[in-house]
Amino acid sequence: MSSVSLFAANPILPAPADFLSIGEVLGNEVTLSVGSLYSTGFLALGALFVLSALILIWVMYQRVRFFARDFGDGGMGGRLKAISGIIIIGFFLIAIGGVLALIGLGNQGYKVVLSQSGLTEFSPSGVHTFAWSDLNRRKSSDHFKTTDFTLRFEQGKAYSCQVRLLQQSFGEEVQDKAIAIVEEAVRRLPPLTD
């Protein structure tokens, strides 16, 4: 998983690299980026969950006013007690909305560039560069001439980035260029030793 600053402390949240969905070939480089569905869409969905939770709690609090009076406690404490289940559901919706918004926020402006020199990761927190010597071939795919392969770059245990190249998402031209870049780079690396 990619440890973008927001996500480094939260390994529970998915890495922005998991949402790469747009690919393009620019010269001798392949650029993969996160589509607006996975960035702005998650932000909007998160806000929608939070707003719906607040509306749900407010509406139920207003509706229970008459029933709480009938049962002897028409004050705020009686109403809150009467809708305590709804409040719990509301907090659950707010938590889901917060997580979705965090994912969308982490995906804003995220992209990776695959080139002859390695992989460059652009995120809201900055730019991080991996050389081909940082490629963990044991955790990456064995074969690169496929429609679906994974590259995992690691710099110690502190920072890593795993990118999945799926032809179905990026298209044949992007996949072919990525395969050519990866094969050339791996050919220059020393052979694996056990």
Image (cartoon, helix red, strand yellow):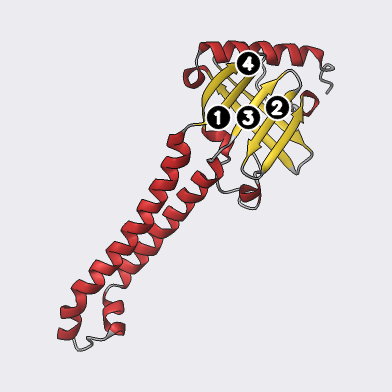
- Disc 1, SS: strand
**Going from the N terminus, do you reach mark 2 or mark 1 first?**
1
**Neighbour class for label 4 at 10 Å: few (<14), some, many (≥20)?**
many
**From what the image shows, is residue 11 above or below residue 75?**
above
Residue named by callout 4: 178
In the displayed orientation, state which residue is furthest to the bottom: 72
Q: Residue 27 occupies which quadrant of the picture?
A: top right
3 and 2 marks in contact (CB < 8 Å): yes
Q: Residue at x 20, y 79 (%)?
A: 65
**Going from the N terminus, do you reach mark 3 or mark 2 first?**
3
Residue 13 in the image: state x and y as whole percent: 55, 47
Residue named by callout 1: 33
Alpha carbons under labels 3 and 2: distance apart: 7 Å
Residue named by callout 3: 112
3 and 4 marks in contact (CB < 8 Å): no
**Neighbour class for label 1 at 10 Å: few (<14), some, many (≥20)?**
many
3 and 1 marks in contact (CB < 8 Å): yes
**Neighbour class for label 2 at 10 Å: few (<14), some, many (≥20)?**
many
Marking on residue 119: 2
- Please name which of the two marks, 4 or 1, marks the residue nearer to the observer: 1
Say which quadrant the N terminus sits in: top right
Marking on residue 140: none
Q: Residue at x 74, y 11 (%)?
A: 184
